[in-house]
Image (tube, rainbow, N blue to C red):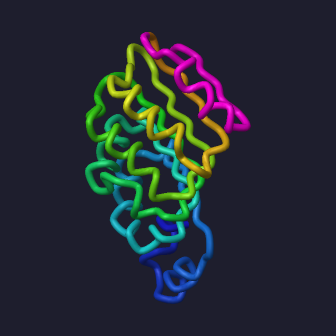
């Protein structure tokens, strides 16, 4: 909608900005369209409930998003976040910082998926924060997680309705 109508006419822009909830699935978005959408993204940040990012169709999409929005406190209504990493081209420190910043959201569902050899190096420190997110109900990891002692998070993970781990 943003790409189609945002610059077309002031009435369309006004209608889009009046929407109460907004979801953004960028997983199938080409790089140029993604950049156009992000150019006016801050206008809607307070209403965003769902963000899906993927490096699959547009390599570097997650890094570019995190460069512009390094923390998720810009999205206080965020309830779903899905990140699909394609390889190790994303800045691990930026990802860890962004995940830690989820404490400023209403996140309920978190999906972290990695292709190939992706391994989130700071996953243990991220898990200490993730497990304490008060609104989190669903947590899914699909990437290399060797070395993590899941049993140390047993009590915190028991509060989730759904928890799944799958080594890529």
* Residue found farthest to the right: 161
Q: Give x and y (percent) for residue 152.
A: 52, 21
Residue interval drawn in magenta: 147-168
Q: How many marks?
A: 0
Horizontal relation, residue 62 to residue 76: left or right:
left
Quarter where residue 155 is shown:
top right
Q: Give x and y (percent) for residue 131.
A: 53, 37
- Quarter of the picture containing the N terminus is bottom right
Quarter where residue 128 is shown:
top left
Q: Give x and y (percent) for residue 92.
A: 29, 32
Q: Is residue 37 above or below residue 140?
A: below
Q: Residue at x 58, y 50 (%)?
A: 134
Q: Residue at x 30, y 33 (%)?
A: 90
* Residue found farthest to the top: 146
Q: Is residue 151 magenta?
A: yes
Q: Is residue 159 above or below residue 47?
A: above
Q: Is residue 60 magenta?
A: no
Q: Residue at x 47, y 85 (%)?
A: 9
Horizontal relation, residue 71 to residue 151: left or right:
left
Q: Is residue 104 above or below residue 114?
A: below
Quarter where residue 79 is shown:
bottom right
């Amino acid at each position: 909608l943003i790409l189609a109508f945002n610059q077309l006419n002031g009435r369309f822009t006004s209608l889009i900005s009046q929407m109460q909830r907004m979801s953004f699935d960028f997983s199938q978005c080409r790089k140029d369209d993604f950049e156009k959408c992000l150019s006016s993204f801050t206008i809607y940040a307070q209403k965003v409930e769902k963000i899906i990012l993927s490096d699959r169709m547009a390599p570097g999409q997650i890094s570019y998003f995190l460069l512009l929005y390094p923390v998720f406190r810009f999205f206080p209504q965020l309830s779903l976040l899905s990140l699909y990493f394609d390889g190790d081209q994303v800045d691990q420190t930026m990802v860890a910082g962004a995940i830690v910043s989820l404490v400023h959201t209403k996140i309920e569902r978190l999906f972290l998926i990695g292709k190939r050899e992706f391994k989130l190096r700071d996953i243990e420190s991220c898990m200490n924060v993730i497990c304490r997110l008060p609104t989190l109900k669903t947590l899914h990891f699909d990437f290399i997680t060797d070395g993590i002692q899941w049993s140390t998070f047993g009590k915190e993970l028991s509060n989730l309705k759904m928890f799944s781990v799958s080594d890529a």
